[in-house]
Image (tube, coloured by chain):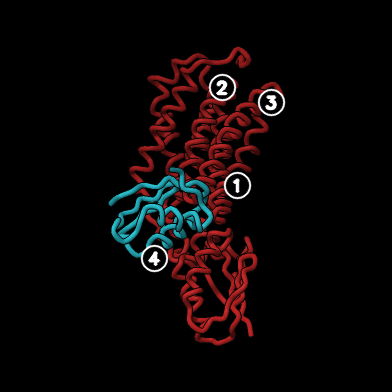
Amino acid sequence: MNKKFVISGMHCPSCAILIKETLDEMEGVESCAVEEGLATVRFDERKISEKSLISAIEAEGYKVNQ
Amino acid sequence: MSTKIFVPDAECDSCFRILEKRLGKLHGLDGFKKGTNEITLLTDDPAIVKQAIHLITAAGFRASLDPFNRMSIRHRIKEFFSNKSKYLLERRMFLYTLYAFILLTALEVIAYPGLLSKIPNFMGTYGWWLFYLNVSVATLGAALWHVAAHKTTTTCMVGMMIGMTIGMQTGMMIGAVIGATNGFFIGSMAGMFLGVIGGVITGKSCGLMGVMEGMMAGVMGGTMGAMISVMMFSDHLLWFMPFYMIFNIIILWGLTFMLFEEVVEEKEVMRRAVDAETFLALIVIIATILGAIMLYGPTSALISF
């Protein structure tokens, strides 16, 4: 499944790297691309839920706009 | 039992979170403390320290046990003349500035007999301002060319500085020149639009902060540049302009050296510039549009030659 998350609170390239690394480490995430304010994630819904992805991003201090 | 590692590019919480995550995976490391542009590892085992430096470098940050000493301006200039290969891109920037200025002047000389000479009192009214337009477009264009050649992201502070400098200087120089011939409104509009575009293009290297800073500087520089010309119009404006241009050019060239120190020195950065033909073609297009605005665009009632 492909999902785009609109993220607020990102302000620099390090924010994008941090979010990408966090998502990449999660089991079930097949690929992800993060740019200013937007993360595009391809994941296996059987292994990980959309809610878990949002929680992981928010745990790093960002807000996912739903 | 601790080792300090200098990490000059780690500026914000996100940078340190990346380092925390990377270093957290390092076996044998008891912990670390973060400071301003540095981290202190709670170990003195050389093998772990070496691995930590490798991990930090792999994350895109400079890291060293010794502080990164900045070169003095004098030393940098001396090296610029002695080490040609190191400053190849910067040397090309200066050359391209010269080429662009010569090309624009040559095109105006060619256009003079058939086109420009038909404008009443052309030399007295527009001569100096076309010269300053050529100087502005050539120096700004080459500085932008140089910044755009760096295919990398920058830290917030560096990106904001780049966006602000290009946005501000573009607005100030173009706004002042067009403001002197066409008045406050057209001068501000030309300076502001080009300043904002230049600020956004260069500021985006660090993300939204750089873009915002570039836009703000473009708006401010464009309106301020035109305002300077209009306000000084009856008070030795032509005497003022050489000094104004020289300081603006020094700032732009200073940015080039700052960029080298902050983004290139001791890093592996891809630098790929647009070729000379494309650069010169873009310069001619921009100068032609600005020249047309200057010569044929609306003129404020405040400006009377």
Position of residue B36 relative to residue B175, above or below, is below
Note the chain letter of the cyan one.
A
- Taking the spot 43% from the left edge, 53% from the top edge, the residue there is A54
Residue that carries the numbered disc 4 in the rendered image:
A25
Q: CA distance from mark 2 to mark 4?
A: 60 Å
Mark in the foreground, 2 or 4: 4
Amino acid residing under circle 4: Glu
How many numbered circles does the render carry? 4
Amino acid residing under circle 2: Thr
Q: Earlier in the sequence, mark 3 or mark 1?
A: 3
Mark in the foreground, 2 or 1: 1
**Rendering coords of residue B127 (x, y %):** 53, 26
**Rendering coords of residue A20 (x, y %):** 41, 58
Name the chain under label 4. A
Residue under disc 4 on the same chain as residue under disc 3: no
Q: Which mark is residue B181?
A: 2
Is the residue marked by circle 1 packed among few (<14), some (14-19), or many (20+) residues within 10 Å? Answer: some
Note the chain letter of the red one.
B
- Taking the spot 65% from the left edge, 39% from the top edge, the residue there is B243
Q: Secondary structure at mark 2?
A: helix
- Quadrant where the N terminus of chain B sits is bottom right
Residue under disc 4 on the same chain as residue under disc 1: no
Mark in the foreground, 4 or 1: 4
Residue that carries the numbered disc 3 in the rendered image:
B232
Q: CA distance from mark 2 to mark 1?
A: 24 Å
Left of B113 or right of it: where is B175?
right
Is the residue marked by circle 2 packed among few (<14), some (14-19), or many (20+) residues within 10 Å? Answer: many
- Taking the spot 63% from the left edge, 82% from the top edge, the residue there is B2
Q: Secondary structure at mark 4?
A: loop
